[in-house]
């Protein structure tokens, strides 16, 4: 029986940003992301309140995946962040905080959205062209002949996620592992295109972090019973491999809708099993040495294969299928019919390994660009955090390979950039004014909003009540204890800037970040000048940060430009 | 869907407070003398008797986020090491109060995290000096030492006794040749004569009363625990007979006074019995079983390998425990092979199968008609129709059973071990045709039989061919249990073994059903301790020595950083460029002192639980005294080592040493202990750094009805 229900009228709200509720929720969201930022960021316990598992995290990807927001404006914001994180892994919190800061600062000024958008876009263009230019003072080119900068980059990422619960020694160990895992994915013979391999993270929870390791090839977890059944069949030369993505469990998975009528005495199961055994016979006659299946292999087929000295590994899982097919050169077989010999591939060798309580089948491919990162951590929640962090770090290394630059971390890029923009708009406002057709005051207001958004973003790194300074030569980020006595002995109180490149022994002068000081042109503090301390720099991914900056400004613009929210209430 | 966010540490840190209150419930489990707890469900009047941290947390209502993290940490420690959970729980409590104290004193969170973390690292580096190498312990196994040593030691170790000493009878001579894997050798480890069965029942009752040392009423409660499921949730915690502890204790030993032998520098452990005594931590009855199991494995390995080609590894995965509640303690023993309980209806069958080698089949899953291997999806939409009017004579299950029997007859199989369930009907049919079917067999047991008998585990009985069948399994009754005792056991115990099987069954018995669980837990704890000690080839000097060294080391560090300022601690912070780096020197002594207080609390509770100090204050004073001495001496580790050697010359412990001549040392395992510390601190620091709780997926109504205080909504 159908029932007709009157449609509810759509709800239309004007100027959504002016609503008190939207402001309040925005500030809650900002509070959450800001308090998570940086190495001393505070953690969040995410759970469903009903006894579900507790996730302790300070990472944008984990936070965003679990946040369920109601208001469309917040949805725009979180979706933009999620898109950024899914493409670049890193700098999610950076993007979110910058976006919130921009919205907040611009709202306070009360200029028309068009002017704001125009000028914001212009300032963004200034930032990007500066960051990409040769004269940029906060970018370091990456030298792939040494591991130093890459290690610093990975270490900075690990350090910025306190919920991984790593000690310094463990951070060094895991950084080295990540870098090694990354290097193992680079093919040795490079022609025109480099096709990177894959690092597979294999979980081993409950063990010590120090027990983590990297192995070339693929580790497939297996049960102890299966492990013990494996006979060391040593064969010279490579092994012929067949890889199945279809289930070989012998069930009738796709009987479709309706009922299948079978007469008494006919067993469909036996029919399928016969088919499987026929398949087995073909594999044996094709001299296949190793059969792997994404799903389950029927025990009788396994028995048949092992009788003929064919190793059968099942339950490989969907995640390993792509790397397996890649390293062995097989085409995954999707049907139980006859198998074309062209689908077979080969591997160099295999062995078995035992780590912790787990047993593994270790596949060693001919040409290895796939490796397994066996990752240990003490508790589940810390392991989950570490896993995401390692994935981020591996991704960042890939991005860095594509665009071999890194940005100074620890807040220095943000303060430096703010100083540059202030200087630029103060000293050469003419071209902007001409291009965008706005007044000097408008430009000043927007510049102030934009730069202070960047600066308070840098300031969000501080969570223990310290004050932020910036030096008036390089425009780097310095932190100092709150209510420090006098300005005179600042150089004694300070040691190094946020990224670790500059030290206070140099003749520098400082000012509080939020105080008004005369705009200056920030200089480059080149790494070779401070080569001694270069082994302990805090660095950020160039590509991820650049994109984060763009996404933040554009999303802020979009949100500021909203004048109506129309909701369909049906 | 609405999401709520709650700021949890504005002024007081709720998370840390929760942690310390949870941890408080487990303080009596610290140390070798553990007081049991009853957990009573007020609603259904059921109760559980527990005496370990893991079981406690299983029964507690830990639905809060912090509680879940705590039980996750304890579970992870238990799953990985099976020991160290009480230490973990206690230190979580001690250090969360320490962290809170630091917060009160205005130390920035990041500094607490760095200093505590590095402080513990420094401790872990320091305690390496108290490691004792364990080498070649199996070299001297055959000749001189026997269990009697173990027994006399443990009787003398008053404070470390868990059971009143009258149960551990002196065993004068125990010939180790008995341990050789002859069929049907039974080791009566508690030394009671097993001859006159009539003795047992009355005695068992008496034992029940003395052992539990509870009032009769509570004893009755504890018996109820057998039927009770683990649904109970702790609401109130009450300490029963706390003062009784001191009565059990015969000697006021402190943590330093339990050791002896050797000169300070030359600590090493080459003797298995000495190692076991040291690792038993007062639980001599469990350790004796572990010892016997290790001996059996060793003998078996030697027999298999001939002249010791490979170094022997103690493998606890090849130990199986069989719990027989209702039998007197004295029936606990260790046997080669597999012991399990079968229904009494197969008595005649077993009599017939006895004394002949039989053939075995191993089934990986269930042995029922409907069972399909894992990953097999049954199609729901298949209908079978009859084409002719001829009705099948048998039901499909009967047809299946007939096929199974055909196969069994064909391959002459008389024993079927299945990991899963077995169809009742099939068991019945098999019994008729003189075939024994045992279901729910442990995976490791299956593996051991597969190796020893040559059988290959299969998923379906139809897979069986000649290659899959194992040979030479013997079935016997476990022991001629007198009939009146058999009544108390539901079924009867039988023993299965083959020549050279690498499997040891430890039969655990207890007249008090409620004790069964904790007995099994305690056995595994001892077994894991020995396993880790042998695997790592090193142990710590135990009895609080490592913790004492940590305490004095931190004290010294704190004093040093007061005097030396910033130089001592460069590199203690992840982020050296922050202002925190420069104010590290200011706060470091405070934080280190708080961390040290945690150790202090640990040690005084340990001593209070163990020895007869009437208050924790007294125990604390005792520690303080030694701490001052250790710090004054300049090198705490050599102070500890020299105290050990003084003990040996009988300065403190004349009472014991004149009787024995040698005081056994106490040992601790290395990695599990250090990991428990780390896990405890990790948890505290994780909670310390957490500032808000985000609850996802709450409905509007739920939040409104909960009267949210301090909740913010998104």
Image (tube, rainbow, N blue to C red):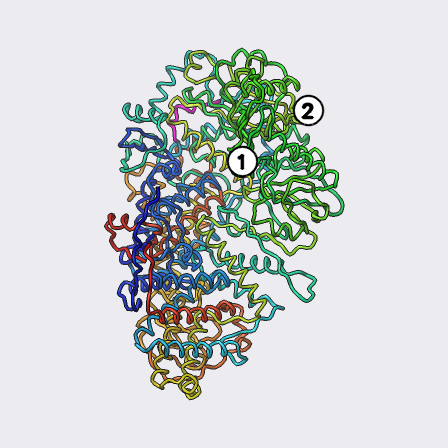
Name the residue nearer the viewer: A517 or A121. Answer: A121
Q: Tell me the residue that label 1 is attached to.
A: B377
Which contiguous range is marked in magenta? B162-171
The residue at the point 47 percent across, 69 percent down is: A409
> Against B182, is A334 above or below?
below
Image quadrant of residue B663? top left
Q: Looking at the rendering, in which quadrant would you find the N terminus of chain A?
A: top left
Q: Is residue B178 magenta?
A: no
Which is in the foreground here, disc 1 or disc 2? 1
Question: In the image, which disc is placed on residue A294?
Answer: none
> Against B299, is A15 above or below?
below
- Judge the density around disc 2: few (<14), some (14-19), many (≥20) Cα neighbours within 10 Å: few
Name the residue nearer the viewer: B385 or B76. Answer: B385
Q: Tell me the residue that label 2 is attached to.
A: B466
The residue at the point 38 percent across, 17 percent down is: B203
Question: Picture coordinates of residue A414 (x, y %)?
Answer: 43, 73
């Amino acid at each position: 029986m159908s029932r007709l229900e009157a449609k509810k009228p759509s709800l239309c709200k004007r100027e959504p940003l002016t609503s008190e509720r939207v402001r309040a929720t925005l500030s809650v969201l900002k509070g959450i992301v800001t308090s998570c930022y940086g190495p001393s960021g505070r953690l969040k316990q995410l759970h469903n309140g009903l006894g579900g598992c507790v996730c302790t995290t300070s990472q944008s990807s984990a936070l965003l995946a679990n946040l369920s927001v109601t208001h469309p404006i917040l949805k725009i914001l979180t979706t933009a962040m999620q898109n950024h994180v899914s493409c670049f892994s890193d700098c999610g919190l950076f993007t979110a905080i910058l976006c919130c800061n921009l919205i907040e600062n611009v709202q306070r000024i009360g200029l028309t959205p068009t002017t704001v958008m125009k000028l914001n876009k212009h300032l963004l263009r200034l930032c990007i062209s500066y960051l990409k230019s040769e004269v940029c003072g906060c970018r370091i080119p990456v030298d792939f002949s040494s591991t130093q900068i890459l290690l610093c980059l990975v270490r900075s990422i690990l350090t910025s996620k306190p919920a991984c619960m790593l000690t310094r020694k463990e951070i060094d160990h895991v950084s080295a592992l990540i870098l090694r895992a990354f290097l193992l994915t680079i093919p040795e013979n490079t022609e025109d295109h480099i096709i990177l391999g894959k690092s597979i993270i294999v979980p081993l929870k409950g063990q010590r972090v120090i027990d983590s390791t990297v192995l070339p090839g693929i580790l497939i977890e297996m049960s102890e019973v299966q492990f013990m059944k494996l006979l060391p069949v040593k064969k010279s030369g490579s092994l012929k491999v067949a890889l199945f993505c279809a289930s070989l469990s012998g069930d009738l998975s796709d009987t479709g809708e309706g009922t299948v009528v079978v007469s008494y005495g006919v067993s469909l199961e036996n029919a399928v099993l016969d088919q499987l055994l026929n398949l087995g016979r073909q594999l044996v006659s094709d001299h296949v040495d190793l059969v792997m299946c994404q799903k389950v292999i029927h025990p009788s087929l396994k028995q048949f294969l092992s009788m003929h000295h064919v190793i059968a590994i099942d339950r490989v899982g969907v995640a390993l299928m792509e790397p397996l097919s890649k390293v062995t050169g097989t085409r995954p077989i999707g049907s139980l019919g006859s198998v074309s010999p062209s689908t077979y591939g080969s591997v160099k060798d295999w062995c078995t390994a035992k780590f912790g309580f787990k047993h593994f089948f270790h596949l060693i491919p001919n040409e290895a660009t796939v490796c397994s990162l066996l990752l240990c951590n003490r508790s589940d929640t810390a392991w989950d955090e570490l896993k995401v962090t390692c994935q981020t770090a591996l991704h960042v290394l890939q991005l860095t390979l594509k665009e071999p630059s890194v940005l100074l971390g620890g807040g220095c890029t943000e303060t430096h950039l703010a100083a540059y923009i202030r200087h630029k708009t103060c000293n050469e406002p003419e071209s902007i004014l001409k291009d965008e057709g706005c007044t000097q005051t408008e430009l000043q207001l927007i510049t102030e909003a934009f730069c202070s958004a960047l600066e308070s973003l840098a300031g969000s790194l501080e969570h223990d009540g310290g004050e932020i300074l910036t030096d008036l030569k390089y425009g780097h980020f310095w932190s100092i204890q709150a209510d420090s006595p006098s300005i005179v002995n600042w150089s004694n109180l300070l040691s190094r800037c946020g990224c670790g490149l500059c030290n206070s022994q140099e003749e520098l002068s400082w000012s509080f970040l939020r105080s008004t000081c005369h705009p200056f042109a920030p200089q480059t503090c080149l790494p070779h000048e401070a080569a001694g301390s270069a082994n302990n720099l805090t660095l950020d991914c160039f590509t991820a940060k650049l994109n984060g900056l763009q996404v933040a400004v554009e999303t802020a613009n979009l949100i500021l430009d909203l004048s109506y929210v129309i909701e369909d209430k049906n | 869907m609405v999401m709520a966010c709650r700021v949890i540490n504005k002024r007081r840190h709720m998370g840390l407070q929760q942690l310390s209150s949870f941890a408080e419930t487990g303080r009596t489990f610290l140390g070798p003398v553990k007081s049991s707890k009853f957990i009573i469900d007020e609603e259904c009047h059921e109760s559980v008797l527990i005496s370990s941290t893991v079981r406690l947390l299983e029964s507690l209502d830990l639905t809060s986020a912090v509680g879940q993290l705590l039980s996750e940490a304890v579970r992870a420690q238990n799953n990985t090491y099976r020991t160290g959970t009480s230490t973990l729980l206690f230190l979580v409590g001690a250090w969360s109060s320490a962290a809170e104290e630091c917060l009160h004193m205005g130390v920035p969170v990041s500094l607490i995290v760095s200093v505590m973390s590095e402080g513990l690292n420094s401790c872990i580096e320091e305690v390496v000096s108290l490691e004792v190498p364990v080498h070649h312990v199996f070299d001297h196994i055959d000749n001189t030492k026997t269990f009697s040593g173990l027994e006399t030691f443990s009787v003398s170790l008053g404070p470390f006794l868990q059971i009143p000493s009258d149960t551990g009878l002196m065993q004068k001579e125990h010939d180790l040749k008995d341990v050789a894997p002859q069929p049907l050798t039974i080791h009566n480890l508690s030394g009671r004569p097993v001859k006159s069965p009539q003795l047992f029942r009355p005695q068992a009752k008496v034992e029940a009363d003395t052992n539990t040392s509870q009032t009769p009423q509570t004893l009755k409660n504890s018996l109820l625990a057998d039927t009770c499921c683990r649904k109970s949730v702790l609401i109130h915690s009450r300490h029963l007979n706390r003062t009784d502890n001191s009565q059990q204790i015969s000697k006021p030993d402190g943590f330093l006074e339990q050791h002896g032998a050797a000169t300070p520098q030359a600590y090493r452990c080459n003797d298995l019995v000495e190692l076991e005594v040291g690792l038993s931590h007062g639980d001599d009855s469990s350790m004796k079983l572990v010892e016997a199991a290790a001996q059996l494995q060793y003998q078996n390995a030697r027999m298999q390998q001939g002249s010791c080609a490979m170094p022997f590894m103690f493998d606890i995965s090849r130990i199986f425990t069989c719990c027989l509640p209702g039998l007197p303690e004295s029936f606990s023993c260790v046997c080669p092979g597999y012991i399990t309980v079968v229904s009494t209806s197969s008595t005649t069958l077993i009599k017939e199968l006895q004394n002949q080698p039989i053939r075995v089949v191993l089934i990986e899953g269930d042995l029922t008609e409907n069972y399909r291997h894992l990953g097999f999806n049954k199609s729901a939409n298949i209908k079978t129709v009859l084409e002719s009017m001829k009705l099948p004579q048998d039901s499909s299950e009967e047809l299946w059973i007939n096929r199974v029997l055909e196969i069994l007859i064909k391959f002459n199989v008389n024993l079927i071990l299945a990991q899963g369930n077995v169809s009742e009907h099939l068991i019945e049919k098999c019994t008729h045709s003189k075939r024994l079917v045992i279901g729910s067999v442990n995976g490791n047991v299956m593996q051991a039989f597969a190796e020893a008998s040559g059988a290959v585990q299969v998923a379906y009985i139809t897979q069986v061919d000649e290659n899959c069948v194992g040979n030479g399994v013997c079935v016997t009754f476990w022991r001629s249990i007198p009939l009146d005792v058999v009544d108390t056991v539901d079924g009867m115990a039988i023993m299965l073994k083959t020549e050279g099987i690498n499997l040891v069954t430890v039969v655990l018995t207890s007249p008090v059903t409620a004790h069964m669980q904790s007995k099994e837990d305690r056995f595994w704890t001892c077994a894991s301790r020995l396993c880790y000690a042998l695997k790592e080839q090193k142990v710590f000097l135990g009895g609080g020595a490592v913790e004492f060294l940590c305490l004095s080391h931190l004290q010294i560090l704190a004093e040093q950083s007061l005097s030396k300022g910033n130089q001592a601690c460069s590199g203690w912070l992840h982020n050296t460029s922050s202002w925190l780096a420069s104010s590290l020197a200011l706060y470091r002594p405070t934080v280190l002192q708080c961390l040290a207080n945690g150790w202090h609390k640990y040690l005084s509770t340990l001593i209070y639980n163990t020895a007869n100090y009437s208050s924790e204050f007294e125990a604390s004073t005792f520690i303080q005294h030694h701490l001052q001495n250790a710090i004054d001496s300049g090198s705490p580790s050599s102070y500890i080592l020299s105290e050990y050697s003084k003990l040996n010359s009988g300065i403190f412990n004349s009472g014991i040493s004149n009787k024995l001549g040698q005081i056994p040392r106490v040992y601790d395992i290395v990695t599990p202990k250090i990991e428990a510390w780390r896990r405890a601190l990790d948890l505290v620091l994780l909670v310390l750094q957490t500032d808000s709780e985000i609850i996802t997926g709450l409905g509007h109504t739920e939040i409104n009805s909960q009267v949210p205080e301090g909740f913010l909504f998104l």
